[in-house]
Amino acid sequence: MYSREQREAALEAYDRLAHEKQGAVLRVLAGEEAARVAEDLGVTRPAVLNWRRAWSEEGAAAFMGDIAERTPGAAGALPDDPEELKRMVRELRMENDLMREVVELVKKDPGADPSSLTNREKAALIDALRGTYSLSSLTSRLAIPPSSYYYARRAAAAPDRWAEARAALAEEFEAVGGSRGYRYLRMRLAARGIACGERTVRRLMREEGLEVPRLRRPRRWSSYAGEVSDAPPNLVARDFRAGLPNFLWLTDVTEFRLPAPGQPKVYLSPVLDCFDGGLASWSISTSPDAELANSSLARACATLSPGEAPWVHSDRGGHYRWPGWIAICEEHGLTRSMSAKGCSPDNSACEGFFGRLKSEFFHCRDWGGVTAEEFMASLDAWLRYYNEERPKEALGWMSPMEYRRSLGLAA
């Protein structure tokens, strides 16, 4: 049997903790900052916020719930056994310490359930608190068998087999300005003699925070100007394959909005060759007028050899239905083809090029303070890089021009 003094001491310890929580909640409700209250009590701010939430839902009974559930007899009655009271106090303290370590050690959001962590994270928590609490109590609370704890601990201490791959990924990702995805990076690792599967590369990128910027889609500029002339049929029917250069061309216009105040928008009109995805030509301007589209088509036609007369596929924009565009097509024997109105999948290969362009060149850079003239020069340089140097998986990791040279189609 325990003495009356021991029993009263245990009761006093638990009562002090319950009143500490209630007092903290009352101070927060009175207008004090939760961080200040937590600092005074030597606990974490999330702990104080959790107490306040529990108080708002259950009142003072929130701090007596565990006692009522575990004690026989009337709800809320305290057990007579001082050791049971001490155990309850230890569990309350362990809960608070776990909550603090979840935030500070494994960097989870406040209020995260410790039992939902990974085994490696649970092992880190146990190591941090093992000097204060027993291994059995910690593994029981975190719902991890001791054998799994020891395995996770050994795994965390083992050398990282992917350390070289992680460093190489970071270097290659930085070298392209964070603009290329896991397929390209896997190819670059292979070139360095580091073998990694696609799933491994994606996992390592995720763990290292190597994320390619997503394409933002502002309201699109439209070149549609009504039924200026009769539209030719869609001869391509979404089949963008071509067995020879200058057999099937695609074109469209896209815009770039510069963040610098007072700078005009910049527009690009490329002519894309479906043989290898290379660019036959392009024009860049601050005006989305007929000259922009006509000049890019005229430059592409200047590269044709005798007897070459490509199909040229576009959307139904007004540029491609005005007399100037039609005259260039007739002069060089080009066959016109058009998408259905408002149907971007009919020209998806060209849209895909715009997506790659904006992901790799535009959205991953800070263009603040850059003038339209400077931007157009940078865009022109990137388009040359795209043709001459940018490797493509579909071409055996060669650029369009390297691919043509390998086939003897270019000098």
Image (spheres, helix red, strand yellow):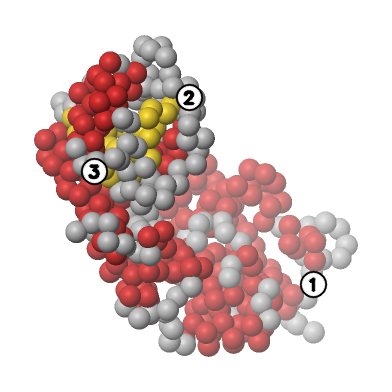
Distance of mark 3 from mark 1, alpha carbons?
100 Å
Q: Is 269 placed above or below 352 here?
A: above
Residue 220, numbered label: none
Q: Nearer the viewer, residue 5 or 334?
A: 334
**At 54% across and 46% down in the image, what residue appears?**
26
Q: Residue furthest right?
A: 73
Q: Nearer the viewer, mark 3 or mark 1?
A: 3
**Percent position (x, y) of residue 51?**
58, 52
Residue at image mark 2: 233
Q: Residues within 10 Å of mark 3 (few under 14, many from 20)?
A: few
Which quadrant of the structure image shows residue 332? top left
Q: Amino acid at mark 3?
A: Ser
**At 38% across and 40% down in the image, what residue appears?**
248
Residue at image mark 3: 305
Q: Is 101 placed above or below 331 here?
A: below
Q: Amino acid at mark 1?
A: Asp
Which quadrant of the structure image shows residue 226? top left
Q: Residue furthest front?
A: 307
**Residue 131 in sight in this render:** no
Distance of mark 2 from mark 3, alpha carbons?
26 Å
Query: Left or right: 226 with respect to 399?
Result: right
SS class of the residue under badge 1? loop
For marks 2 and 3 on the same chain, the one whose residue lies earlier in the sequence? 2
